[in-house]
Structures are given as structure tokens and as C-alpha cells.
């Protein structure tokens, strides 16, 4: 049986500190902090560097760190085998490591905007190393064998009979097992870290429905908003409910994601740590306008959040409803309730009829009759959405607004629709 000689192990251990030093330099050269690079990545790169050193010592420098004590093969064959093994291993290290470095430094994910992003991104980077190594291990040895050991002209002989190798089989069973357990351990500790209750959490209630979001802030007298405003560096506990079907709360920049289940309250913890504007996306197919189920997320410095939460306007986004005209109020309500996720106001075709120019129009219904879009028709269609469908549109509007919109709300929405027809 072939096994690495003691010399190889000693050489590897001697090369390791050099590998670490080089890994550290690569990290600095790439401008990555150790926290983002990760101790595990540092170690993996160090080991790869040490292996590359061994190949250099064994190849160009000819220090014979490998020993092949199989007496059956001639010295020439042994050297041949060693050469193939070294070349294929070298290619595996270079291609696998290169792929992993490219994946983990290629800016494939959106900006990280929460403290929860750090352990998640580190874990993903570590996965890239495993992905890179496994990809190279399979493809390099396969392509190398196909090219180098291909059948030559006139070669009709059989291949060499190879018997099993118990040591090799134990290694390729035990090593992946340890790796899987190690990743399991990392997964559990990471999940613990990102779901652990934090001191001074602010509860934000999330109300999800087809096809929009509403947020309320119990700490600020149940203040409600269709945009999600959050203070920077304060741990947030989202308590989420759905009015109708499954949805899923996902802000890619925060990394974490949680399903919202009708009849249950699910929780999600996020500590935003970067000011900016993001989008909350629904990540669960929830009906025709699932892709339109987007909400604005604004992370503000704590003082600015406080100012917003206690009612002062910020950039004209938050409004005092009483100070608005009925059409303006209607537009605000229509956006907050998600009407405009399905009914465009610019004439474009979404799930429902556009509101542009709809007021006063004669619409053909799906039973062939004609209805005039007036106040009575709109009110009836909000309260009983499936009663009189405009031809070409399905019965997809949620039958919930009778419980949500007041009479005044509906008047304001109708005023807004009228303003789109003038
Ligand atoms: Cu809600 Cu998809």
C-alpha cells in the first residue's frame, strides 16, 4: 500500500506556518478584514498554500517529499504515478481555490445591512471553499484521465486490474463525515446566534396580505405605516401575521427570511446596521401578483427614526392624513392597502384593471353585460370583488376589504380614481 512518508508529513507541518503567513497576506492584499475572511477560510487557504509548497519542493526543487514504497512497480512507473498525482492535485488546488476565491469575493450578494449578515455570509463563503474543492476534485481528475489516459491508436489491451484500497475508502468516508458534522455544528451555532433574543428589542408587527405589507409599531402607540422604517443598530423583533395565504418576509440585505403563516404569529429578529433604502420582498408564491408584493424599507439613524415615529414628516413620505385632500388621501390609502400592487395608475396592465381613466368608463363584464364605473360600482366591487368581474380579469381580488376599509376610506379612494380620469 502506498502512503505518504513521514517526510511528507513533516514537510507539510513545516510549510503550514508559511501557508498561514501567505494566507494572511492574501487577505490583506484583497482588502478583506479577518472577520469577513473568517478563521476557517484563513486556515483552508493556509493548508492549500502549504500543499502548493510541497508540490514546489517535490517538483521543481526535487526534494522527494513523497515516497512510494510499493515494490511491485518499477521505479520508473512509481515516478510516473507520482507525477500524474502531483499534476492532478496541483490543478485541483489551483482550480478549486481559484473558484472559491472568485465566488467569495465576486460581490454576488447584495450589500450586508444587518448584524445577522456577518455569520451568514461567513458560512456561505466557507461553503464556496467546499464547492470549489469538490468541483475541482471531480472535474480535474475526470478531464485529466480522459485526456492523459485515453486509448491510443493500436492499443487493444485491457486496463490494469485494481483491487480496493481499504485505507483510501476509510479516508473518503471519514473525512466527508467530519466535514458534514462540522458544517452541522456551524449551522446550529449560527442559527442560535441570529435568532437569539437581544436586549432592548423593538417589536414591529408585520401584517402581510395579497399583495402588500403593513407595519405597526406598538412602542409608538400602534403607529401604522405601509413603509417599513427602522432605526439603525436597534434589535428588531418582527411579529408577523397573514390575512390570507402563506407569504414570506425577506429583505435580501438583511439575509434572514421567515415564512408568514395564516392563523399563526411567526417571529424574525434583525438588527439593521446600515442606513439606506431596501425592499422587503415576498418570498413565497402567494398568487397572481406575488411579484408585486414589494414594500419600501428605510433604515435611519436613531434620531431620525425617533422623529419619524413620533409623527414628524421625513422627506414628505410620512403624512398627516387629515391635512390631505380626498384624492391625496385616497392615493395614500390605496398604496398602503396594496390596491396599487394590482391596479396600476399609469395605464399599464397588472392583475386588475388599471385605474387610469377608469372612472366613468363603460366596462364590458365577463357575462357580456356592460357596467358604468361609477361610485356605486366601485364601492360594490371593493365590498364584493367577485360579483361583477370586468371581462378578461379573474376573480383574484381578496374578499377582505369590507372589514378593512371604512366608508370614508372608500370615498377617498373613489376620489383618487376620479382624479385619474380628469
Ligand atoms: Cu406574498 Cu408572495
Image (cartoon, rainbow, N blue to C red):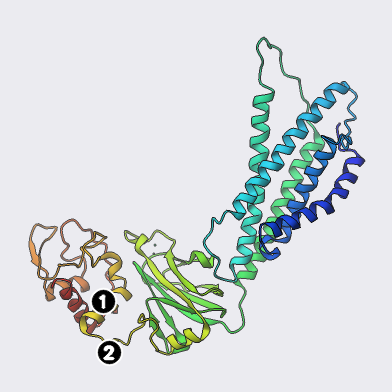
Q: Quadrant of the C terminus?
A: bottom left
Question: Where does residue 218 sit, x and y in percent of width and height?
Answer: 46, 86
Question: Where does residue 257 sit, x and y in percent of width and height?
Answer: 51, 65
Taking 249 as reference, is 41 left or right?
right
Q: Quadrant of the N terminus?
A: top right
Q: Is residue 292 visible in the rendered structure shown here?
A: yes
Whether 102 is drawn above or below 371: the answer is above
**For this rendering, which residue is in front, 87 or 208?**
87
Name the image quarter holding residue 359: bottom left
Name the image quarter holding residue 288: bottom left
Q: How many numbered circles does the render carry?
A: 2
Q: Secondary structure at mark 1?
A: helix
Residue drawn at x 9%, y 57% is 368
Mark found first going from the N terminus, 2 or 1? 2
Pointer 2: residues within 10 angstroms few (<14), some, or many (20+)?
few
Disc 1: which residue: 331
Which corner quadrant of the figure contains ligand 1?
bottom left
**For this rendering, which residue is in front, 301 or 355?**
301
Question: Where does residue 116 sit, x and y in percent of width and height?
Answer: 59, 69
Disc 2: which residue: 322
Taking 89 as reference, is 199 left or right?
left
**For this rendering, which residue is in front, 263 or 334?**
334
Label 2 to label 1, Cα distance in Å?
13 Å
Amino acid at each position: 500500500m502506498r502512503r505518504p512518508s513521514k517526510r511528507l508529513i513533516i514537510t507539510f507541518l513545516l510549510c503550514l506556518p508559511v501557508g498561514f503567513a501567505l494566507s494572511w497576506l492574501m487577505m490583506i492584499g484583497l482588502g478583506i478584514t479577518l472577520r469577513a475572511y473568517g478563521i476557517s477560510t484563513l486556515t483552508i487557504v493556509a493548508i492549500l498554500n502549504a500543499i502548493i509548497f510541497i508540490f514546489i519542493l517535490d517538483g521543481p526543487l526535487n526534494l522527494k517529499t513523497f515516497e512510494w514504497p510499493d515494490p511491485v512497480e518499477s521505479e520508473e512507473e512509481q515516478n510516473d504515478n507520482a507525477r500524474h498525482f502531483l499534476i492532478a492535485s496541483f490543478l485541483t488546488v489551483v482550480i478549486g481555490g481559484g473558484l472559491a476565491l472568485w465566488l467569495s469575493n465576486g460581490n454576488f450578494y447584495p450589500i450586508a445591512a444587518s448584524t445577522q449578515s456577518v455569520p451568514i455570509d461567513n458560512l456561505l463563503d466557507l461553503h464556496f471553499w467546499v464547492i470549489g474543492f469538490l468541483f475541482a476534485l471531480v472535474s480535474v481528475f475526470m478531464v485529466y484521465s480522459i485526456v492523459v489516459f485515453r486509448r491510443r491508436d493500436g492499443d487493444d489491451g485491457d486496463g490494469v486490474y485494481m483491487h480496493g484500497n481499504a485505507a483510501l475508502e476509510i479516508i473518503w468516508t471519514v473525512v466527508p463525515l467530519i466535514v458534514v458534522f462540522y458544517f452541522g455544528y456551524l449551522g446550529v451555532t449560527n442559527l442560535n446566534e441570529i435568532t437569539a433574543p437581544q436586549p432592548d428589542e423593538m417589536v414591529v408587527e408585520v401584517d402581510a396580505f395579497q399583495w402588500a405589507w403593513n407595519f405597526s409599531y406598538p412602542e409608538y402607540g400602534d403607529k401604522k405605516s405601509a413603509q417599513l422604517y427602522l432605526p439603525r443598530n436597534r434589535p428588531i423583533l418582527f411579529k408577523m401575521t397573514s390575512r390570507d395565504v402563506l407569504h414570506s418576509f425577506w429583505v435580501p440585505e438583511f439575509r434572514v427570511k421567515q415564512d408568514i403563516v395564516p392563523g399563526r404569529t411567526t417571529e424574525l429578529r434583525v438588527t439593521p446596521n446600515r442606513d439606506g433604502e431596501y425592499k422587503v420582498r415576498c418570498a413565497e408564491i402567494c398568487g397572481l401578483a406575488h411579484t408585486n408584493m414589494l414594500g419600501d424599507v428605510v433604515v435611519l439613524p436613531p434620531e431620525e427614526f425617533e422623529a419619524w415615529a413620533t409623527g414628524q414628516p421625513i422627506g414628505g413620505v410620512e403624512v398627516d392624513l387629515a391635512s390631505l385632500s380626498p384624492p391625496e388621501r385616497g392615493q395614500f390609502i390605496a398604496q398602503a392597502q396594496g390596491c396599487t400592487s394590482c391596479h396600476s395608475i399609469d395605464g399599464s396592465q397588472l392583475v386588475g384593471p388599471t385605474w387610469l381613466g377608469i372612472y366613468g368608463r363603460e366596462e364590458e363584464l365577463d357575462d357580456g353585460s356592460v357596467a358604468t364605473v361609477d361610485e356605486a360600482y366601485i364601492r360594490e366591487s371593493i365590498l364584493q370583488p367577485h360579483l361583477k368581474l370586468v371581462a378578461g380579469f379573474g376573480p383574484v381580488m381578496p374578499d377582505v376589504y369590507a372589514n378593512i376599509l371604512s366608508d370614508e376610506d372608500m370615498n377617498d379612494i373613489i376620489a383618487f380614481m376620479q382624479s385619474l380620469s380628469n
